[in-house]
Amino acid sequence: MSATQEEAPTVVVIDKRPDQASTLKTMIEFLDTPEVTVADTSSWASVVSSRKIKAVFLGPGLSQAETSDIRATLHQQCREVPVVVVGEDDVSST
C-alpha cells in the first residue's frame, strides 16, 4: 500500500517499549491529533512508507544508535517530516 494524497496524515510513535509508546500516543492524541500510529524498531519503516506522515516521535525506549539510524533514514526518505526525540523524563505513565 502506498501513501495517497487523500489519506489523513498520521503521527508515528516509534519505541520498542509498548508501555511508553502507548503513553506517548495517548499524550499526542490528547493534543487533538486525529491519527497516531505506534511502531517498533522492526516495523517502523513499513509504517512510514505506507502512510502520509505528519510527524515522527522517537520514544525514550530507543538506544542512541537506534535513534541515530532511524533519524538518518527518515532524513533520506522524507526530509520535510519533523522528528521529535523524546527523553525518558518527558514520558511518565503516572
Image (cartoon, rainbow, N blue to C red):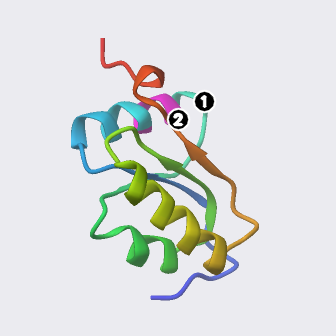
Q: Are marks 1 and 2 in contact (CB under 8 Å)?
A: yes
Magenta residues span: 25-29
Report helix, strand or loop for mark 2: helix
The numbered dot on residue 3 is none
- The residue identified by callout 1 is 31
Depth check, front residue: 89 or 4: 89
Residue farthest toward the bottom in the current orientation of the protein = 1
Task: Say whether residue 21 is magenta.
Answer: no
How far across and how far down the image is residue 87, in percent?
A: 47, 31
In this picture, residue 2 sits left or right of residue 41: right
- Residue 45: x and y, percent? 42, 75
> Spatial distance from mark 1 to mark 2, Cα to Cα?
5 Å
Instruction: Report the residue marked by disc 2.
Output: 28
Given the image, on which type of amino acid does mark 1 rest?
Leu
Near mark 1 (Cα within 10 A), the count class, few <14, some 14-19 or many ≥20, is few
- In the image, taking residue 40 as reference, residue 77 lies left or right, namely right
Look at label 2 and name its amino acid.
Ile
Inspect the magenta stretch and tell me whether residue 27 lies in it.
yes
**In the image, what residue occupies the spot 54% across and 74% down?**
73
Q: In the rendered image, which quarter is residue 61 located in?
A: top left
Q: Nearer the viewer, residue 63 or 34?
A: 63
Q: Nearer the viewer, residue 86 or 66?
A: 66
Q: Quadrant of the C terminus?
A: top left
Point out the image quarter for the N terminus: bottom left
Considering every residue shown, the one lying at the far front of the view is 65
> Vertical placement of 52 versus 20: above or below?
below
Residue at 24%, 43% in the rendered image: 17
Judge from the rendering whether residue 43 lies leftward or rightward of residue 77; answer left or right: left
Q: Residue at x 53, y 27 (%)?
A: 30
